[in-house]
Amino acid sequence: MWGDEYPALRLVGETSLDRKAEAYMERIEYGAIDTTVARANALLIIKAVNNHDALVQALTKTVAFYDNLIAPHRQGEAQLLDELATVLAAVTSGVRNPET
């Protein structure tokens, strides 16, 4: 389950003479993430961290591609999308199947 936690106060005690405020953590739950999806997400994060240098290099190349080719001429958007798809495929390879 996932959600938000925040501090709250409640009154405890049977009578006004022994009543006191008590601090506790309240939680609002929003839902749950399927185990398979959670595992795939965790593997994607690990893969992204392990491939940080390659990812930075690929993104730098993509930015340079945009700066040099697309921005001055406003042409080649399809090429940029292909390049971004290639970067995404390289970063996420092997993550689609959580068992790999």
Image: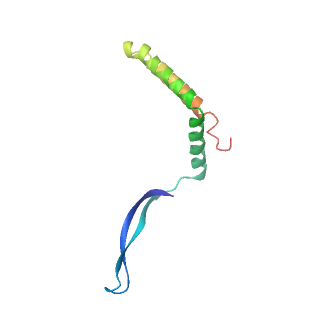
> Which residue is found at the position 65% from the left and 41% from the top?
97
Please determine whether, in this image, residue 20 is positioned above or below residue 80: below
Q: Nearer the viewer, residue 11 or 78?
A: 11
Tell me where residue 79 appears, x and y as whole percent.
49, 19
Q: Residue furthest right?
A: 100
Residue 95 image-quadrant placement: top right
Please report the residue visible at 35 percent of the width from the left and 78 percent of the height from the top: 20
**Where is residue 49 shown, x and y percent of the image?**
57, 36
Q: Determine whether 67 is above or below 32 in the image.
A: above
Horizontal side of 16 relative to 6 (left or right) equals left
Residue 5 point in image, percent of width and height = 42, 59
The spot of residue 34 in percent (x, y) is 57, 52
In the image, what residue occupies the spot 59% across and 52% down? 35
Identify the image quadrant of residue 27.
bottom left
Q: Nearer the viewer, residue 45 or 29?
A: 45
Nearest the camera: 47 or 82? 47
Left or right: residue 1 versus residue 95 is left
Question: In the shown orientation, is residue 19 left or right of residue 98?
Answer: left
